Amino acid sequence: MSNAIVDGGRIGIEDVAITLGGALVLHQQEALEIPAGEFVCLLGPSGCGKSTLLGALAGHLAPGRGRLTLDGRPIDGPDPERGLVFQHHTLFPWKRVLANVAFGLKMKGVPRAQRERQARELLRLVGLEGQESRYPGELSGGMQQRVEIARVLINHPRVLLMDEPFGALDALTRVRMQQLLLDVWARVRTTVVFVTHDIDEALFLADRVLVMGPRPGRIIENLRPGFARPRGAELVTDPQFVALKRHCLGLLHPHAEGAVRNERLTPLGGTAVPGGQLRFAL
């Protein structure tokens, strides 16, 4: 995987509206582009349309209006080039770890020796060397998610779509998985769109945080945290990190105590303007 830098992965979102059950769930009128190789977090409260947008990018939902593209081509259905990781793993419980990871290549007709070699390499990348013969039920939640990530990455997707993949994990395991994901992403450099409602997680992981407002969902702010990489756990106590967190709290919970709307701050990559409102350079 050391040379498996993914080509392409540029996402286009153009005036997209999605209706489910007769209700308008998502209405992103402003055009948006996610460059290839960028790590983007969709941040917002439950029910704001984050997972709906992710499902549309995966090809499982068709917009009623507008256009979604990958490298200029319309997204019109599921494809392994857009890998999807859910909060709960979708591993085959009757298959061993190695067979689970290699399954996608098996479906493509790749010879057994070749697919198992690639699967072993990916398992080393996600820190699971030596676990190849175990079954998913014998693994911890964090290990199961690592297997799931490896199973998606073996198809060399241009885009990795992640729907709160660490939401069911305990706090310590979640932090470890966030760091692991950044380490893996630094190696493969695929485009990542990561759904979360956790502000710390979004700011720690992302090149860019797209904050979504209440349903019908739309992007209300486009933030570039600007923190240098690689990032360590100490980042979350950095004063600039705390300032951006409070700003996001003010966006998501306008009446929350400590909202930053009355403060004068200078975020990384942005400027402070009169009245304490924040404007970020995009």
Image: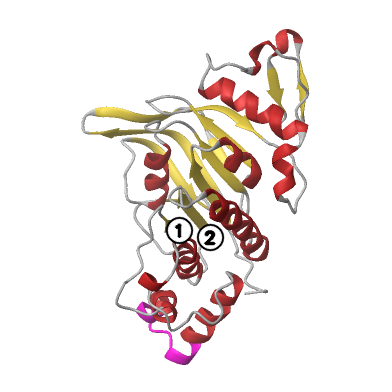
Q: Residues within 10 Å of mark 2 (few under 14, many from 20)?
A: many
Residue 110 sits in which quadrant? bottom left
Left or right of 37? Residue 169 is left
Q: Quadrant of the C terminus?
A: top right
What residue type is disc 1 on? Arg
Q: Magenta region's main secondary structure?
A: helix
First in residue order: circle 2 vs circle 1? 1
Residue at coordinates 77% horizontally, 46% vertically from top-left?
Answer: 228
Above or below for 239 versus 122:
above
Residue at coordinates 70% horizontally, 37% vertically from top-left?
Answer: 225
- Residue matched to label 2: 158
What residue type is disc 2 on? Arg
Above or below for 106 versus 9:
below
- Residue matched to label 1: 82
Residue at coordinates 67% horizontally, 74% vertically from top-left?
Answer: 2
Q: Can you give x and y, in whole percent of width and height, for residue 157 in the image?
A: 50, 63
Q: Nearer the viewer, residue 109 or 201?
A: 201
On the question of residue 282 being in view, the answer is: no
Q: Residues within 10 Å of mark 1 (few under 14, many from 20)?
A: many
Does the magenta segment cover residue 56?
no
Above or below for 163 versus 181:
above
Q: Residues in magenta?
A: 105-114
